[in-house]
Image (tube, rainbow, N blue to C red):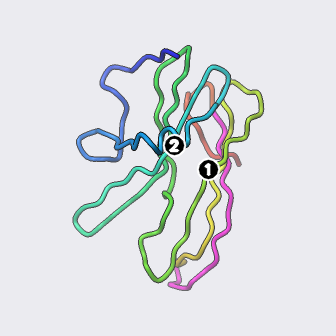
Amino acid sequence: MISKTVQGGVESIEGYGRTSWNAQEFKKNLQAFGNNTLGSYNIDGYYGNGYGESVWSLLLLNEEGYIFQQMFEEGKISEQPEYGYSSAIKVNKNGQPFYPFQIHYQGTDMNDNNRMVKVNKIVIYQYDVEGKFYSKMK
């Protein structure tokens, strides 16, 4: 498989414009994300000044196009030890050029009123061919 890289590379939340991809995680999550498209995902994060943020990072290698990277919502684990939630990605292989996928969040979190609430939600993402990015399905 041969993919092209856009000038300037791909963006990242990580410092200095780089994403940290663990080779074992990349290989473990590598799968078809569409016709002629392989993809993988991992947790990308930024930590500094007492603040941390993690997001899902998706990397697509398309035989007919450019290497594509996009980040999505919160990552795998919440930051507070008193409560926590995790998330997992599942690809829905449906024969489209770019497969939709879902992120399933589970656990507990703090709401706007500082109350513990159960988290059990699924967010589905569909590829927008015109915009060339994934967006939440409504």
Residue occupying the point 45% across, 53% down:
55
Q: CA distance from mark 1 to mark 2?
A: 8 Å
Quadrant in the picture for residue 21: top left
Magenta-drawn stretch contains 61: no
Q: Position of residue 74 (x, y in %)?
A: 49, 58
Is the residue under label 2 in contact with that under label 1 (CB below 8 Å)?
yes
* Amino acid bearing label 1: Ile
Question: Which image quarter: residue 121?
Answer: bottom right
Which label is found at residue 58? Answer: none
Locate residue 127, reporting x and y percent.
Answer: 63, 34
Overall secondary structure of the magenta section: strand
Q: Residues within 10 Å of mark 2 (few under 14, many from 20)?
A: many
* Callout 1: SS: strand
Disc nearer the start of the sequence (1/2) = 2
Q: x and y percent of residue 39 in the render?
A: 55, 33
Q: Residue 120 colored magenta?
A: yes
Label 2 amino acid? Tyr
Q: Which residue is mark 2?
A: 41
On the image, numbered disc 1 is attached to which residue? Answer: 89
- Compared across the picture, whether 97 is left or right of 108 comes to right
The correct choice, above or below, for 15 with respect to 66 in the image is: below
Q: Which secondary structure, mark 2? A: strand
- Identify whether 1 is placed above or below 95: above
Q: Position of residue 70 (x, y in %)?
A: 48, 39
Using the image, determine if residue 38 lies above or below residue 110.
above
Q: Which residues are magenta?
A: 112-127
